[in-house]
Image: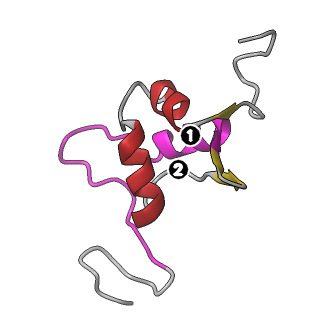
Amino acid sequence: MGGKEMSDSNEWFDTPAASAYLGGRPRPRTLEKLRVNGGGPVYHKHLSCVVYRREDLDAWAAARRRTSTSDPGPEPTCSGGCRRGGEHA
């Protein structure tokens, strides 16, 4: 890691490296689609260069942890107060 500690949250990844860091899933093209459609990890855009911070990739991956295939995960919300199924509160 070039002398950096593994926990260095200031480490930056381009899209292919972010995909590799996440274990190859999602693939780089999927990360690109998630940037357009939403739902992907937080990213930074510097001119035409898109980069991800290690801590943002870790947070995004942790939010997708499940204990079983039937575990729905945390209740999603949108800025309009949507609940699962698109109903608004």
* Residue reaching furthest to the front: 48
Q: Is residue 89 magenta?
A: no
Residue nearest the observer in this picture, 81 or 49: 49
- The residue that label 1 is drawn on is 57
Give how far apart the Cα atoms at labels 1 and 2 are. Answer: 6 Å
In-image side of 5 versus 72 (left or right): right
Q: Position of residue 3 (x, y in %)?
A: 81, 9
Please determine whether, in this image, residue 64 is positioned above or below residue 38.
above
Sequence-earlier tag: 1 or 2:
2
In-image side of 7 versus 19 (left or right): right
Mark 1 near mark 2, Cβ–Cβ under 8 Å?
A: yes
Q: Residues within 10 Å of mark 1 (few under 14, many from 20)?
A: many
Q: Residues within 10 Å of mark 2 (few under 14, many from 20)?
A: some
Residue 4 appears in the figure: yes
Q: Which mark is residue 41?
A: 2
Quadrant where the C terminus sits is bottom left
- In which quarter of the view is residue 14 placed? top right
* Residue interval drawn in magenta: 51-78
**SS at mark 1?**
helix
Q: Position of residue 10 (x, y in %)?
A: 78, 34
Residue nearest the observer in this picture, 85 or 39: 39
* Residue reaching furthest to the left: 70
User: Which residue is pictured at 53% across the width and 33% down the height?
Assistant: 18
